[in-house]
Image (cartoon, rainbow, N blue to C red):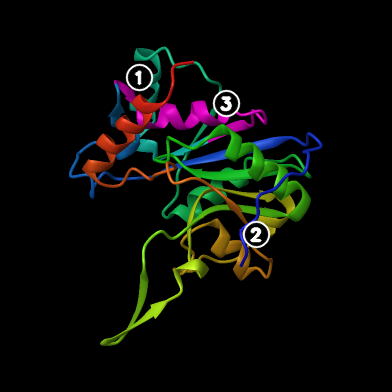
Amino acid sequence: MQITNPTSEIRNPKCYAIIVAGGSGTRMQSALPKQFLELNGKPVLMYTLEAFHNSAASPELILVLHANYHVLWKELCAVHNFAIKHTLIPGGETRFHSVKNAIDQITDKDVLIAVHDAVRPLIDPAVIDEAYRYAEAHESAVVAVKSRDSVRQLTGDTSQSLNRDDIYLVQTPQTFQSALLKKAYEQPYDQKFTDDASVVEQAGAQIHLIEGNYTNIKITFPEDIAIAEALINKKPSA
């Protein structure tokens, strides 16, 4: 699939962003879920919400967070004087159920909905806006980057080289027209649903990729914190 760099103008439909924060912190070797770990003295999750708030689309924000951490999040907001408006709702058993919980909160029709990993704090607001623009025109916009590494597919004991020019690494946000996303999430849960694109594709819709950037990393392992801090410190001051 050819990746697209959208240039169409958005007609200003209402936009929502679902921020999914369900991480347990297991791979971070931390008792604290990774969305709460600090980058330069501020929780990861706050950077993520700020990026969407600072985008031109300025979507309504829905934060999906395990109910056990709602009190902690509110305490962190108070400590850091974090005042960006958002709706806080409990997560579900899986990522699929968490996103469905958030979708069910959106009663407006004909809106655009972006779903984003809470632990991708370095998402560029310009990429967010491009995703909304392209999804408005083409129903879906999934941010991805071309693989920089050689790729091999393992089948049993045999591996086969794949053309890396045909391999894209999928990121978030994944943005959709609301009617399409709501219909897709009426399906029963399937273990093969790894992201929103897989849910929508299973419902029969085409997935359109748009160009992201390599700095949109996902905080997964301890070393990712150091990488993210270096990228933040590299940015020119406003």
In the image, residue 220 lies in the stretch drawn in magenta:
no
Q: Distance between the Cα atoms at labels 2 and 3? A: 24 Å
Q: Position of residue 205 (x, y in %)?
A: 69, 66
Magenta segment: 41-62
Q: Residue 137 vs residue 30: left or right?
A: right
User: Which residue is drawn at the image coordinates 50% and 58% (left, top)?
Assistant: 195
- Which amino acid is tagged 1? Glu
In the image, residue 47 lies in the stretch drawn in magenta:
yes
Instruction: State the mark number for residue 53.
Output: 3
Per the image, label 3 sits on a secondary structure element best described as helix
- Which amino acid is tagged 3? His
- Which amino acid is tagged 2? His
Per the image, label 1 sits on a secondary structure element best described as helix
For disc 2, the marked residue is: 208
User: Mark 2 packing: few (<14 Cα in 10 Å), some, or many (20+)?
Assistant: many
For disc 1, the marked residue is: 75
Per the image, label 2 sits on a secondary structure element best described as loop
Please give the count of numbered marks on the rendered protein. 3
Q: Position of residue 75 (x, y in %)?
A: 35, 19
User: Mark 1 packing: few (<14 Cα in 10 Å), some, or many (20+)?
Assistant: few
Q: Nearer the viewer, residue 161 or 156?
A: 161
User: Which residue is drawn at the image coordinates 49% and 64% (left, top)?
Assistant: 193
Q: Position of residue 199 (x, y in %)?
A: 57, 63
Q: Is residue 132 above or below residue 152?
A: above
Q: Position of residue 137 (x, y in %)?
A: 78, 50
Q: Is residue 55 above or below residue 28?
A: above
Instruction: State the mark number for residue 201.
Output: none
Q: Residue 143 vs residue 20: left or right?
A: right
Q: Nearer the viewer, residue 51 or 149?
A: 149
Q: Earlier in the sequence, mark 2 or mark 1?
A: 1
